[in-house]
Image (cartoon, rainbow, N blue to C red):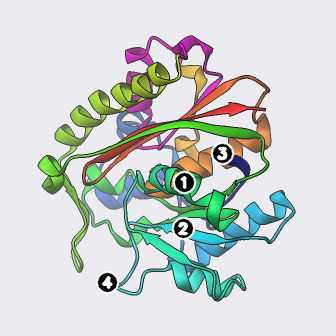
Amino acid sequence: MAFLRAFGSYVPARVVTNAELAARLGCETDWILNASGISERRYAETESVADLATRAAEDCLARAMTRQVGMVIVSSGSSPRRFPGPAAEIAAKMGFAGVPALDVPMASAGSLFGLALAAQCASSAGPVLVIAAEKMSTAIADDKNTAILFGDGAGACLVDPKEGGAEIVRWDLHSDGTYSEALRLEFGAPIHMDGYTVILQASRKIPAAIREVLEHTSTPASAVGTFLMHQANQNLIVRIAKALDVAPEKFFSNIARYGNTSSASMLIAASEWHAQSGFRAGEPVVFAGFGAGFHWGALLALGL
């Protein structure tokens, strides 16, 4: 058994508005909002991926009121070097030297895969701290189709083997490299995204994964209290809600304020949602994500 005990998040101070980007990219502010649902995003100036991650993780542990951690899992698709990844550095920054620290270098879906891995490891390792941190502002060029989307930030979750506000009941994860060239970030180059392919595949695969996890737990979509998704694009979120015949209001969204923070976005959203309302006894909550690779899936937790 594994439980979602606490969440945390951190976003940098600098706010980048649509007006600022429109002037730089030569497009209209209304076009940015209509195309993405994003009004503003945050950029880290001097903070590194490890700095962002540490701030979110400390917030999470403060909310959990514990510093007992048996493993650290860090997801980031924007780490600045090939190796080492940021996990060991983050663990050392937090005083967890000697604790196993694992990098999951997966954009967008990495936090979802991290939660599933933590649920498997918690029974033997003890509480697992899952962190996702991205500095996507370093990965974009002056391409209006990608520059409008991305922002920086970090989210965290403590997965505990004994206690928490919700029990992790089931997850279903998938990977398929057929379209791996459609969304990629090469070293020394800006992000490349074939937007049509990404949206087409995401709009098919995310609802299918959510249906899969619901069917495996005999849970009707109408019974789910909240859907916490990777915040990729507001139009995509609405499309997925429609595919599941669920009111869009059940999909928590904060993309308007932060943009697409890749693997960090789902945990930033979960942290804000948890602070505002949180789990309710007997009510299912679904986490879902899709990202480069392609990797995608869904996880169901039941409020206690």
Q: Secondary structure at mark 1?
A: helix
Query: x and y percent of residue 268 in the render?
Result: 61, 52
Dot 3 or dot 1: first in sequence order is 3
The answer for how far apart the CA atoms under marks 2 and 3 are is 18 Å
Circle nearer the viewer, 2 or 4 = 2
Identified by mark 1, the residue type is Gln
The answer for how far apart the CA atoms under marks 2 and 4 are is 17 Å
Q: Which mark is residue 82?
A: 4
The answer for how far apart the CA atoms under marks 3 and 4 are is 34 Å
Circle nearer the viewer, 3 or 4 = 3
Q: Camera-side residue: 56 or 20?
A: 56
- Quadrant the C terminus occupies: top right
Identified by mark 4, the residue type is Arg
Q: Secondary structure at mark 2?
A: strand
Provide the residue span drawn in magenta. Answer: 219-247
- Crowdedness near tag 2: few (<14), some (14–19) or many (≥20) residues, C-alpha within 10 Å: many
Q: Given contact means CB atoms under 8 Å apart, are the residues at marks 1 and 2 in contact? A: no
Q: Given contact means CB atoms under 8 Å apart, are the residues at marks 3 and 4 in contact? A: no
Q: Secondary structure at mark 3?
A: loop
The answer for how far apart the CA atoms under marks 4 and 1 are is 27 Å
Identified by mark 2, the residue type is Ile
Confirm whether the magenta stretch covers residue 284. no
Q: Is residue 70 visible?
A: yes
- Crowdedness near tag 3: few (<14), some (14–19) or many (≥20) residues, C-alpha within 10 Å: few
Query: x and y percent of residue 85 in the render?
Result: 43, 81
Residue assigned mark 3:
1
Left-right relation of 253 to 187: right
Q: Camera-side residue: 25 or 286?
A: 286
Residue drawn at x 44%, y 34% as measured from the top left? 234
Q: Name above or below for residue 3 compared with residue 238.
A: below
